Image (spheres, helix red, strand yellow):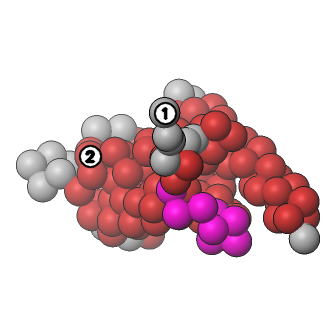
Amino acid sequence: MGTNKNFILQKKYLEFLPALFQVLWGLWILNPFENTFKITSAYNLMGTLAPEWVWGLILFVIGLFQLVVIFKGNLHLRAVSSILCLFIFITMSILIIFGNPASVTIPTYFMFALCEWFAYTEILADIKEKK
């Protein structure tokens, strides 16, 4: 039975789950019927830097970019997308720490950032191995 290697995730789970989370979270924030940043003080600082829809669009686009390059297989683009996602999760964690240090989302975002860091190091190893 033949398999399509473009859709085999294997080691790509560390990239796939944070990317999927970003796409879904970006869509959730882009929801025009609710203002999710008003629900908790954790997002106050993020809301002062940019409107909610901008954050949603950034999250959606970066997450979608990462999902696309995961399946395209280009290691250099995967490395770039992994660093972008790592940067986003670290940035959001820091902004939320200042917005509400008791927020339960802080360890969640740090965990996704850690996944992206591990993914990035694996990608770098794969790039080095192919040379």
Where does residue 113 sit, x and y in percent of width and height? 66, 46
Residues 115 and 108: in front is: 115
Where does residue 13 sit, x and y in percent of width and height? 60, 38
Q: Which residue is label 2 attached to?
A: 28
Q: Amino acid at mark 2?
A: Trp
Magenta stretch in the rendered image:
71-78
Q: Is residue 78 left or right of residue 114?
A: left
Residues 93 and 25: in front is: 25
Seen at 48% across and 33% down, the residue is: 1
Residues 100 and 125: in front is: 125
Q: Is residue 67 visible?
A: yes
Mostly what secondary structure, the magenta segment?
helix
Relative vertical location of residue 1 with respect to residue 18 in this rendering, above or below:
above
The crowding category of the residue bearing disc 1, from other C-alpha atoms within 10 Å (few below 14, some 14 to 19, many at least 20), is: few
Q: Is residue 119 magenta?
A: no
Mark closer to the chain start, 2 or 1: 1
Q: Element type at marker 1?
A: loop
Judged from this view, the residue extending furthest toward the front is: 1
Distance from disc 2 to disc 1, alpha carbons, whole Å, reads: 39 Å
Seen at 60% across and 61% down, the residue is: 73
Q: Is residue 112 visible?
A: no
Residues 93 and 128: in front is: 128
The crowding category of the residue bearing disc 2, from other C-alpha atoms within 10 Å (few below 14, some 14 to 19, many at least 20), is: some
Where does residue 83 sit, x and y in percent of width and height? 68, 63
Relative vertical location of residue 75 with respect to residue 21 in this rendering, above or below:
below
Q: Element type at marker 2?
A: helix
Q: Is residue 104 left or right of residue 25?
A: right
Where does residue 101 sit, x and y in percent of width and height? 59, 37
Q: Which residue is label 1 attached to?
A: 1
Quadrant where the image shows the C terminus? bottom right
Q: Quadrant of residue 109?
A: top right
